[in-house]
Image (cartoon, grey):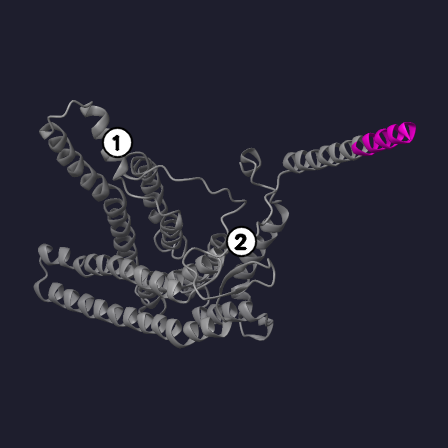
C-alpha cells in the first residue's frame, strides 16, 4: 500500500521549527538563518524537575484509585455473600463499571495535562514534541488501564475476578469511545444544524438559503486533530485482547465487533463532524510500531505466566512452584541470563519457544515483498538511466555550444 501511494521510499525531510517553539532570536548554525533559539539544558531541567515528577504523581494517584476500586469490589462481594440474592449478584459488576468510567475520565484529563507540559517543555521540532507526548501518554494509559488486571492476575490470583474485570473494562471502554468520539459530536452537530436552519429561515434577504446553510455548517465544523487518538485506542484495545487472552479469549470477538462498528463511526466522524483534513504522507506509523511490538512481547510473557499458574499445569508439577519459575524465566529473558540453572526451569521453555518464534517470523517475513523489491530496484535503475541520459544530453549541448563559439571566432 505504501508503494502504491508513493510513500515507501520517502526520505526524511529537513524539519523546520514547530509553530509553538519560542526563544531568543539568533543565527541557526545549520541553516544560517535567524530564528528563535532555546538552550537544551533549560528544556532538560523542565523535563526532569517538573514533567517527570508530575507524571510519577499521576501514576501514584492512578494506583490509589485502583486500591479504592478493590475496596469497592470487596464491599460488593461481602454484601452479596451476606444476602445471597440474585439482585445483589448484579451489584458485583457495579465497581468494575464505575472504575472503567473513572479510567476513561482520568485518561482524558491526563491527556490535556500531558499536552500542556509537552508544549511548555518548548521542543523545537514537531517530531520531538510528538515523541515526548506519546511517551507520557502511553506510560500513564498502560498503568491506568492494565495495573488492576495485573494485580488481580499475579497478586490476588483470582481468575474469575480477572475475567469479570477484563470484560467490563473492555466493553465499557469501547462503548465510551464510541459515544465520546462519534455519537456525541454528531448529536451536537445535528443540534447546531437545527439552530442554523432556524437562523436562515429568519433571514429575509434574497439569498440561496440552502447554499448559505451549507457554507455556515461547513465553516463551523470541528478540526480533525490527527491520528493520535485512533492509534492510542487501537493500542489499548490490543492490550485488552492480547495481554490476558488465555484467561478471556472472548475479548478478541468483542474487539472484532467493535472494529466493524468503528469503521462506520469513523466514516461518520470524518464526513459529517470534522472538516476534511489535509493529508500528511508517511512511510510508516512511526513510534507506534515500537509500542505495538513491545505490547506483543509483554503479552507473550504474561500469557505464559498465566498458563503456568493454571490448575492443569500445577497438577502436572505438584512439587514445584511453576508460577514462580515462569516469572523468574521472564525476568531472565529480559536481562539475557541463562535459566538452565533453575530447578525445573524446563517448564519455562514454551515461553522461550514463543518469543523465539515471534522474532524468527519477524526476521523471516520480509518487510517488503519480493515483487515490491523488484519494482523498487527497477525504479532506481530507471532513475539512474534517466540521470545518465540527462547528463549526456547536457554534455552534448555544451560541446555543441563550444564548437559554435570556436567557429565564430
| Quarter location, residue 271 | top left
Nearest the eye: 247 or 134: 134
**Which residue corresponds to mark 2?**
15
Q: Position of residue 161 (x, y in %)?
A: 27, 61
Residue closest to the eye, 233 or 162: 233
Residue 362, position as x, y percentages in the image: 58, 50
Q: Is residue 400 magenta?
A: yes
Q: Is residue 159 visible?
A: no
Q: Is residue 361 left or right of residue 311?
A: right
Image check: 385 left or right of 94?
right
Q: Which residue is mark 1?
A: 215
Q: Nearer the viewer, residue 185 or 120?
A: 120
Is the magenta region chiefly helix, strand or loop?
Answer: helix
Numbered badge on residue 374: none
Q: Which residues are magenta?
A: 394-409
Q: Residue 115 location, x and y as percent?
A: 35, 60
Quadrant assignment, res 359: bottom right
Secondary structure found at label 1? helix
Mark yes or no: residue 363 visible.
Answer: yes
Judge whether 201 appears above or below 232 on screen. Answer: above
Amino acid at each position: 500500500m505504501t508503494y502504491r501511494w508513493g510513500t515507501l521510499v520517502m526520505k526524511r525531510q529537513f524539519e523546520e521549527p514547530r509553530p509553538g517553539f519560542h526563544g531568543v532570536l539568533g543565527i541557526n548554525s545549520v541553516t544560517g538563518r535567524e530564528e528563535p533559539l532555546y538552550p537544551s539544558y533549560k528544556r532538560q531541567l523542565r523535563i526532569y524537575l517538573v514533567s517527570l515528577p508530575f507524571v510519577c504523581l499521576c501514576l501514584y494517584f492512578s494506583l490509589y484509585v485502583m486500591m479504592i476500586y478493590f475496596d469497592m469490589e470487596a464491599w460488593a462481594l461481602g454484601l452479596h455473600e451476606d444476602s445471597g440474592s440474585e439482585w445483589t449478584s448484579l451489584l458485583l459488576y457495579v465497581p468494575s463499571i464505575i472504575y472503567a468510567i473513572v479510567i476513561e475520565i482520568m485518561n482524558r484529563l491526563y491527556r490535556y495535562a500531558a499536552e500542556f507540559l509537552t508544549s511548555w517543555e518548548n521542543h523545537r521540532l514537531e517530531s520531538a514534541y510528538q515523541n515526548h507526548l506519546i511517551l507520557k501518554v502511553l506510560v500513564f494509559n498502560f498503568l491506568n488501564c492494565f495495573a488492576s488486571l495485573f494485580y488481580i492476575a499475579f497478586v490476588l490470583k483470582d481468575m474469575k475476578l480477572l475475567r469479570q474485570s477484563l470484560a467490563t473494562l473492555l466493553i465499557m471502554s469501547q462503548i465510551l469511545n464510541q459515544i465520546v468520539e462519534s455519537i456525541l459530536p454528531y448529536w451536537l452537530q445535528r443540534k447546531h444544524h437545527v439552530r442554523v436552519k432556524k437562523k436562515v429561515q429568519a433571514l429575509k434577504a434574497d439569498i440561496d438559503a440552502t447554499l448559505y446553510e451549507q457554507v455556515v455548517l461547513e465553516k463551523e465544523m470541528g478540526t480533525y486533530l490527527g491520528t493520535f487518538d485512533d492509534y492510542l485506542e487501537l493500542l489499548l484495545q490490543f492490550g485488552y485482547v492480547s495481554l490476558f487472552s488465555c484467561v478471556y479469549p472472548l475479548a478478541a470477538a468483542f474487539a472484532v465487533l467493535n472494529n466493524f462498528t468503528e469503521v462506520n463511526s469513523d466514516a461518520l466522524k470524518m464526513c459529517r463532524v470534522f472538516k476534511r483534513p489535509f493529508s500528511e504522507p508517511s512511510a510508516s506509523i512511526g513510534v507506534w510500531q515500537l509500542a505495538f511490538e513491545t505490547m506483543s512481547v509483554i503479552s507473550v510473557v504474561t500469557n505464559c505466566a498465566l498458563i503456568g499458574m493454571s490448575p492443569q499445569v500445577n497438577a502436572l508439577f505438584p512439587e514445584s512452584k511453576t508460577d514462580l519459575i515462569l516469572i523468574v524465566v521472564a525476568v531472565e529473558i529480559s536481562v539475557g541470563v541463562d535459566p538452565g540453572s533453575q530447578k525445573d526451569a524446563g517448564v519455562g521453555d514454551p515461553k522461550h519457544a514463543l518469543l523465539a518464534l515471534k522474532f524468527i517470523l519477524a526476521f523471516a517475513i520480509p518487510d517488503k515483498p519480493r515483487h515490491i523489491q523488484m519494482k523498487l530496484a527497477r525504479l532506481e535503475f530507471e532513475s539512474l538511466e534517466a540521470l545518465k541520459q540527462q547528463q549526456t544530453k547536457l554534455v552534448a549541448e555544451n560541446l555543441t555550444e563550444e564548437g559554435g563559439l570556436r567557429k565564430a571566432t
